[in-house]
């Protein structure tokens, strides 16, 4: 499945819900399915700056593809990073770095988050893309 196909699948999933309370519940459920970062990797250098809650992100490159795992101390944030991982995991660092994450706007995620959570979302995207650029420079 391509990066865009994964985004379209998320858009389709969110279109099934009638209101944002249902969408928030779905995001929380997604957080429960998040591939969790190992406790030993919950280090300061893996914390995402700009998030209201603590969010740890680990990214490595395995066989030319980004392998992403994360955790957060806030359940909604865990679901948000889970959405990003669902789209970007197992993609090449080049594709991750240049990805147009159109699903965020299409599902209305950013406009339905509090300002601090919206900033956190941008920080998550930035951190994942920076990690991809770092992987490309190696």
Image (cartoon, rainbow, N blue to C red):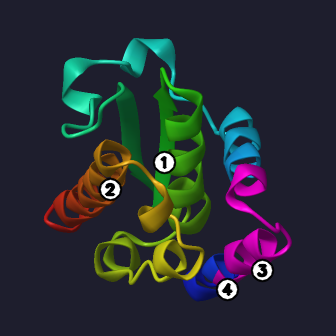
Against 28, residue 65 (above or below) is: below
Q: Secondary structure at mark 3?
A: helix
Q: Quadrant of the N terminus?
A: bottom right
Tell me whether the residue at label 1 lies in contact with that at label 2, contact meaning CB atoms closer than 8 angstroms: yes
Viewer-proximal residue among 117 and 60: 117
Mark 2 to mark 4 CA distance (whole Å) = 19 Å
Does label 4 or label 3 sit earlier along the sequence? 4
x and y percentages locating residue 41 in the rendered image: 38, 21
Labelled pair 1, 4 in contact (Cβ < 8 Å)? no
| C-alpha gap between disc 3 and disc 1 | 23 Å
Question: Is tag 1's residue or tag 4's residue first in the polypeptide sequence?
Answer: 4
Mark 4 residue crowding within 10 angstroms, few (<14) / some (14–19) / many (20+)? few
Dot 3, crowdedness within 10 Å: few (<14), some or many (≥20)? Answer: some
Give me the C-alpha separation between circle 1 and circle 2. 9 Å
Q: Is residue 133 left or right of residue 132?
A: left
- 84 or 93, which lies in front? 84
* Residue with the mark numbered 2: 128
The residue at which mark 3 appears reads as 12
Mark toward the start of the polypeptide (3 vs 1): 3
Question: Sequence order check: which comes first, mark 1 or mark 2?
Answer: 1
Where in the figure is residue 12, as x and y percent of width and height?
A: 78, 80
Q: CA distance from mark 4 to mark 3?
A: 10 Å
Q: Residue at x 67, y 48 (%)?
A: 24
Residue that numbered label 4 is attached to: 5
Q: Which residues are magenta?
A: 8-23
Give the mark nearest the N terminus, 2 or 3: 3
User: Can the viewer see residue 126 in this picture?
Assistant: yes
């Amino acid at each position: 499945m391509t990066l865009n196909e994964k985004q379209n699948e998320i858009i389709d999933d969110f279109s099934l819900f009638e209101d944002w309370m249902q969408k928030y519940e779905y995001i929380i459920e997604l957080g429960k399915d998040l591939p969790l970062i190992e406790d030993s990797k919950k280090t300061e250098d893996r914390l995402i700056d700009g998030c209201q809650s603590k969010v740890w992100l680990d990214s490595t490159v395995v066989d030319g593809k980004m392998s992403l795992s994360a955790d957060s101390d806030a359940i909604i944030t865990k679901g948000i990073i889970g959405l990003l991982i669902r789209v970007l995991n197992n993609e090449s660092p080049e594709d991750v770095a240049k990805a147009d994450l159109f699903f965020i706007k299409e599902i209305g995620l950013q406009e339905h988050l509090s300002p601090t959570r919206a900033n956190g979302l941008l920080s998550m995207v930035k951190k994942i893309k920076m990690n991809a650029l770092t992987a490309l420079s190696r």
